[in-house]
Amino acid sequence: MSTAPHPAADRSAAARAHCRDRVQHHEAELVELSRSIHAEPELAFAEHRSAAKVADLLARHGFAVRTPVADLDTALVAESGSGELVVGICAEYDALPEVGHACGHNVIAAAGVGAALALAGIADDLGITVRLIGTPAEETGGGKVLMLERGVFDDVAMAMMVHPGPEEVCRPTSLAIADLEVRYTGRAAHAAAAPQLGRNAADALTVAQVAIGLLRQHLEPRQMVHGIVTAGGAAPNIVPAHTAAVYNLRAAEARSLQRLENRIRACFEAGATATGCEHEVVQISPVYAELNPDGWLSEVYGRAITELGREPLDRGDEQGPVIGSTDMGNVTQALPAIHPMIAVDCGDAVNHQAEFAAACATPAADRAVLDAALAMAWTGVAAALDGAQRDRLLAAARDRSARSSSEQICTSGGVA
């Protein structure tokens, strides 16, 4: 007795085969995009060449591209299809000072483009809209936070991106982060002839650094603080009148981060009090929330990447290791989304090292682009064809869109 094939299974298999074919078809273009972005690293909010490369490639393949968006010159949205289920694919492309693409955002951008191209040809058949969202300024500046606040994600039912790293992780853990700059103002004087007339802003910063160092013994689990001096004085024979430092504050979640910030601000104030200087504290980026990845999407991605021959440390149904901080955390707090890590062969190097930057322009990184693109595409197919999950994602998107509309009415002075 023969068993007839299940129509739903046939449809899924055909869609997955199409995605694989499209990724293979665009392989040369995707690798070239990754290598080209890597070769011209650009910092936060100045990624003009990188954003143009992403936009131009998608436009050549029939995507409707809008740029700039959300009042951000290097943000973009590219769409294909007209289905109700909006599948968002985030592409990062900013680099780091001095070490270039040492976080592999060139891989992220090319993989995102690959996933979008893979899904575009079957978008209407699946009932989806494919939306590639170019998100600037992840390393500092919080591009995704700003785009969330300005409505770019309002109708997105699910969002994905894949980040390169030294390990394969389906559901990584990240820390909430706040970026603070402290600025001290004292009084300049001749350091030898009249030091008594000066108020030493460098001493104020030193006192703050000592206070923070002593505080570290008493930090809560997963609280971290690290910083650099950005202005330390002009010459040793002038009592410094102006100094500044930038600090990253990290914690497991928002409430712990706020407690840490309160204590660090007290350390900053101690420096000013001890030296008679004035000080101000400036938040230089939006607060990044911790990752809260969608469980079902994480599991589906985990199965996909395993099928492609990779061996993730987790299965997607459990929290993986801490990877740092990302503004994708804010996206995962607002809607069903995932931020898995894909391994590249980088030896002993880790993200934010020059050696890792070098590893992100190698055949292993090229393979990561293609595998990540296909795994995300297959995850989009699964979401589109699983009736219960599709309904869940659509319901959450409608609810979020309705809340956003209500908030806009209230903000404009109307009656909700």
Image (spheres, grey):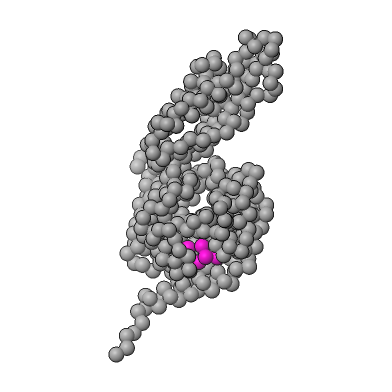
Q: Residue 253: name its quadrant.
A: top left
* Depth order, front residue of 203/276: 203
Task: Say whether residue 122 is left or right of residue 236.
Answer: left
Q: Residue at the spot x=54%, y=16% of the render?
A: 275
Name of the residue lying farthest toward the front: 348
Q: Does the magenta stretch include residue 390?
A: no
Q: Residue at the spot x=32%, y=64% of the render?
A: 388
The image shows residue 290 at horizontal and vertical percentages of: 42, 45
The image shows residue 141 at horizontal and vertical percentages of: 54, 41
Q: Main secondary structure of the magenta part?
A: helix
* Depth order, front residue of 266/401: 266
Q: Residue at the spot x=40%, y=31% of the render?
A: 218
Q: Tell me if residue 341 can be seen.
A: yes
Name of the residue lying farthest toward the left: 1
Name of the residue lying farthest toward the bottom: 1
Question: Is residue 46 shown above or below 298?
Answer: above
The image shows residue 83 at horizontal and vertical percentages of: 44, 64
Please state the extent of the stretch shown in magenta in the rendering. 370-377
Q: Residue 56: name its quadrant.
A: bottom right
The image shows residue 18 at horizontal and vertical percentages of: 50, 74
